[in-house]
């Protein structure tokens, strides 16, 4: 009996994955738990493991293909003969909506027809939005808005609304029309990496958070000295100082929920890491309580897994506080960042000038107010000025 292999959901945010490569060939024997393929999720490259013994059978989805979660990518057969028989069928193809499109040839700004064929969704035969036979009437403004929305609607979308209020509610629910690229210079379409696509989706979700920013210029001379003497990453010491400041100001470790504030008992700090594929926030656990030696070991391991795209979900999920350090770029004097969903604050670190740095704290206004942010930055400033015992390396617990 041939059992289908489906694209697994390897993280909570994964809706599709890119099949990087097959580690086995059709007809190869496989054991339960053995890696048979590699899949790129929104954060890492992970193994797909066989769910029972057998032989790899086709058709196999082509490598370097985007596949939605749950779609069949291959089969496990009970015998080599069955695996060969299965492979004679046509290979499964993912739907066009998730297949990586081939790079389009540059098109002229004047060749509107050709460009529209590449990037524009198909429009219905008529762009008008007829009123239904219920007798309800739309205002001229609502009718124009409905016509504009209908021009960009896909065939499976619902029929046009009936009233002005219906049109306005529909307009708020739907995304704006696609950018009119034909009015500009020649262009081509490039498929984003899974990481960049995930970041974009997360940032869109973050727009619902009412955020404010408070900045402070603080001295980092003492902290730099502690980092140099202890052979510790300055970014790690900044994360440690931020976690200790959160401990003094516990609202910054909370998360807003419709049912109330989630008051979390451990400070897990996500540190933004720049990679060629996009931004990844690697999470250090229990940063306020564990020793610097333990944290340093974990941080080295996280950076290694980031560089090899081998992060596990627990390496990038569940952060309570965020740190983004652009201090390695001397031209950056200050910046702010979008606050990720699930956190109350993100601390942005700019480049030092005369050993002074502008720190910008982005906050969820549903949880904290400006005075809370000021108190947090005061606590953080005191920690930077006096690294003392917390900034010295200590041996890991046995």
Image (cartoon, rainbow, N blue to C red):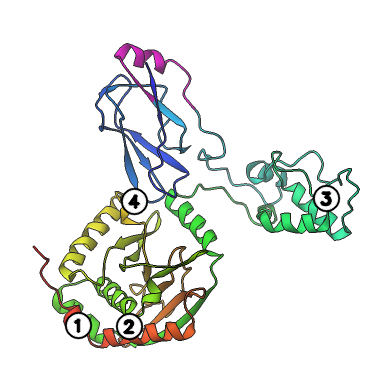
| Residue topped by disc 3 | 162
Q: Nearer the viewer, residue 262 or 19?
A: 262
Residue at x 38%, y 84% (from the top left corner): 377
Position of residue 197 in the picture relative to residue 353 (left or right): right
Q: Name the secondary structure under disc 4.
A: helix
Q: Are marks 4 and 1 in contact (CB under 8 Å)?
A: no
* Number of the front mark, 4 or 1: 4
Position of residue 217 in the picture relative to residue 166 (left or right): left
Q: Name the secondary structure under disc 2.
A: helix
Q: Nearer the viewer, residue 231 or 354?
A: 231
Residue 65 % position (x, y): 45, 36
Residue 369 % position (x, y): 49, 81
Q: Tell me how far mark 4 sits from mark 2, CA to CA.
A: 30 Å
| Residue topped by disc 1 | 225
| Residue topped by disc 4 | 313
- Residue 258 seen from this side: yes
Numbered label tally:
4
Q: Name the secondary structure under disc 3.
A: loop
Residue 110 % position (x, y): 71, 50
Residue 194 % position (x, y): 44, 49
Q: Tell me how far mark 2 sits from mark 1, CA to CA.
A: 17 Å
In the current view of this chain or complex, which residue is farthest to the front? Answer: 259
| Residue topped by disc 2 | 380
Residue 284 picture quarter: bottom left
* Number of the front mark, 2 or 1: 2
In the current view of this chain or complex, which residue is farthest to the left? Answer: 398
């Amino acid at each position: 009996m041939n059992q289908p292999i489906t694209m697994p959901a390897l993280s909570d945010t994964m809706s599709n994955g890119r099949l990087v490569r097959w580690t086995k060939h059709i007809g190869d024997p496989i054991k339960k738990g053995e890696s048979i393929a590699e899949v790129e999720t929104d954060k890492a490259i992970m193994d797909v493991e066989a769910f029972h013994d057998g032989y790899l059978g086709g058709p196999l989805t082509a490598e370097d293909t985007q596949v939605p979660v749950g779609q069949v990518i291959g089969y496990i057969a009970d015998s080599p003969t069955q695996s060969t028989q299965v492979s004679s069928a046509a290979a499964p193809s993912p739907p066009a909506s998730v297949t990586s499109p081939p790079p389009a040839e540059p098109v002229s700004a004047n060749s509107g027809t050709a460009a529209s064929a590449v990037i524009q969704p198909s429009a219905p035969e008529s762009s008008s939005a007829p009123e239904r036979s219920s007798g309800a009437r739309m205002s001229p403004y609502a009718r124009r808005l409905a016509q504009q929305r209908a021009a960009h609607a896909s065939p499976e979308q619902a029929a046009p609304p009936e009233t002005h209020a219906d049109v306005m509610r529909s307009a708020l629910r739907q995304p704006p029309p696609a950018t009119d690229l034909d009015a500009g210079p020649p262009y081509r379409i490039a498929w984003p990496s899974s990481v960049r696509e995930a970041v974009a989706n997360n940032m869109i979700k973050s727009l619902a958070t009412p955020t404010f920013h408070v900045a402070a210029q603080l001295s980092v001379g003492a902290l730099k000295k502690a980092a140099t003497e202890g052979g510790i990453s300055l970014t790690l010491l900044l994360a440690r100082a931020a976690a200790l400041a959160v401990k003094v100001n516990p609202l910054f470790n909370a998360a807003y929920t419709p049912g109330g504030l989630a008051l979390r008992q451990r400070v897990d700090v996500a540190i933004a890491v720049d990679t060629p594929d996009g931004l990844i926030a690697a999470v250090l656990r229990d940063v306020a309580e564990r020793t610097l030696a333990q944290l340093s070991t974990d941080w080295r391991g996280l950076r290694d897994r980031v560089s090899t795209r081998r992060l596990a979900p627990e390496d990038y999920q569940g952060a309570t506080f965020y740190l983004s350090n652009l201090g390695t770029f001397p031209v950056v004097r200050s910046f702010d960042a979008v606050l990720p969903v699930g956190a109350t604050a993100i601390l942005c670190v700019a480049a030092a000038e005369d050993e002074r740095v502008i720190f910008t704290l982005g906050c969820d206004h549903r949880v904290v107010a400006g005075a809370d942010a000021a108190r947090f930055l005061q606590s953080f400033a005191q920690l930077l000025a006096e690294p003392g015992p917390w900034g010295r390396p200590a041996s890991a617990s046995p």
